[in-house]
Image (tube, grey):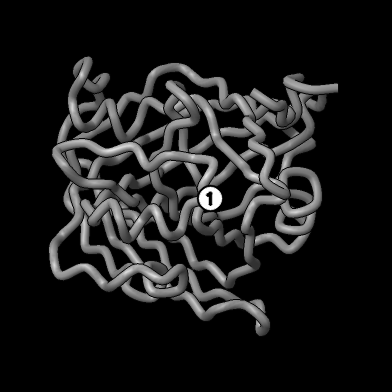
Amino acid sequence: MRDLPAVSLTWRDGLFAHWPVEASRVQSLVPDELDVDTRRGSAWVSALPSLVAASRPWLLPEPAGLDFPQVNLRTYVRHETRPGVYFLSLDAGTSLGVRVARALWGLPYHHAEIDFETDGEWRRFESNRLHTDDSPARFAATYRPTGRPSHAECDSLSAFLAERYRLYLVRDGTVWCSRVEHDPWRLCPAEATVHADGLLESVGLPASSADPMVRYAPMAKFTVRTPFRP
């Protein structure tokens, strides 16, 4: 049974932090079956800290869901002509959620100790990976919106980085895809201080000397569907 609704969740108080990276560096981290998607002559990697709320099997009501902070590190790929994302790592503050996601999707989830605080309009996020057999990874960010939310302009860099509705996996040389259903993102300009060197280095990317391009996302509701072979 493939391409069926599987998990519903709400993504709150999130930050998009984006860095341009040489495409050859990113391609070495992506399975050969996928092509790195580039924009402005560069590949891109993004760290997305957020609070995941009411994560649950699709048929269950929101009160049955699990709340936990999470930061994912992703890049942008294509399979044939279809754009999507490829996760380099995901750190979550729930051991149960990590075990389920690893078992059902095969995603590179790691259990982390994560502190997430709200202070007025500011959000403070700090993650420290706990798995002793994994590469150590630390991530921290302090951020706030500085304007009103709006949709990304069509064909803009923000749209290229945000409006992705497929995630790709490769298992034993076979490409699998999960569709991710949500309304178009409403993003705010943001002010942020981001410390992502440990997270980038954990997957083999160099620490960035440049500040990331940042956007704040107040909320989005998702349904993640079961994987299928595209």
Q: Which residue corresponds to the image point at 64% horizontal and 36% vertical from the top-left?
A: 175
Q: Which residue corresponds to the image point at 53% horizontal and 67% vertical from the top-left?
A: 114
Q: Position of residue 219 (x, y in %)?
A: 43, 32
Q: Position of residue 11 (x, y in %)?
A: 51, 37
Q: Quadrant of residue 186?
A: top left
Relative to residue 137, is residue 95 drawn left or right?
right
Q: Position of residue 87 (x, y in %)?
A: 51, 49
Disc 1: which residue: 31
Q: Residue furthest right?
A: 1
Q: Nearer the viewer, residue 153 or 167?
A: 167
Quadrant where the N terminus sits is top right
Q: Quadrant of residue 54?
A: top right
12, above or below 47, in the image? above
Amino acid type of the residue that numbered disc 1 sits on in the rendered structure: Pro
Residue 121, can we see it? no
What is the secondary structure assignment of the residue under circle 1? loop
Q: Which residue corresponds to the image point at 52% horizontal and 80% vertical from the top-left?
A: 136
